[in-house]
Image (cartoon, rainbow, N blue to C red):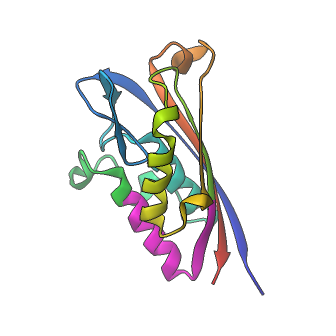
Amino acid sequence: MIDIRQGIGYDLHRIVEGRPLIIGGVEIPSPFGLLGHSDADVLAHAITDALLGALALGDIGQHFPDTDPTYKDSDSMFFLAEVAEMIRKKGFIVSNIDSVVIAEKPKMALYIDKIKFSVAAVLGIEPNRVSVKAKTNETVDSIGEGRSIAAWATALLVSE
């Protein structure tokens, strides 16, 4: 019998000057980046949480706590790769990822394909199994006012 699991993930980080903006493992040209203990890649964090949630394995903070200096300024794609390996060891494969990045600026459209390929490569799946959409918050709340960026993701896992 095939076992199918679904998970959802969310993340949000404040915008700050003086840091690179990394989304889905891709550096996006920008005068600002995101504040966080790691590289603050909101999309990688949301996808990581979705994958962990699908197998009821907690959340990113439980596995890679921001209180641990080991993870200071870490590449968040490392977290994603570690969780992908955990999933494989539990006998599951990633069927697909659906995600959305919510940012008033910068515009993400030019980087969507690069982001999809980056995420797919880390997860060991075909890029056509990764959906990345970009939305704005229409000038509403901290995201819409350009003070933060958020991401949502869902993951579907299937037993091998």
- Spot the residue most to the bottom: 1
Q: Position of residue 88 (x, y in %)?
A: 51, 78
**Magenta segment: does it hold 88?**
yes
Residue shown at 29% from the left, 21% from the top: 31
Give the quadrant of the C terminus: bottom right
72 to the left or right of 149 = left
The answer to whether any part of residue 101 appears in the image is yes
Residue depicted at x 50% and y 46%: 113
Q: Position of residue 61 (x, y in %)?
A: 43, 51
- The residue sitting at 44% across, 73% down in the picture is 85
Look at the image and tell me whether residue 45 can be seen. no
Question: Does the magenta stretch mainly form a helix, a strand or a loop?
Answer: helix
Name the image quarter holding the N terminus: bottom right
State how many labels appear.
0
Q: Which residues are magenta?
A: 79-96
Q: Quadrant of residue 22?
A: top left
Q: Is residue 15 above or below residue 138?
A: below
Q: Is residue 144 above or below residue 111?
A: above
Q: Is residue 63 magenta?
A: no
- Does residue 2 appear to the left or right of 18 in the view shown? right
Q: Quadrant of residue 5?
A: bottom right
Position of 117 with respect to 68 (left or right) is right
Of 72 and 104, nearer the camera is: 104
Where is residue 122? Give x, y as percent.
Answer: 42, 63
Q: Position of residue 138 (x, y in %)?
A: 63, 15
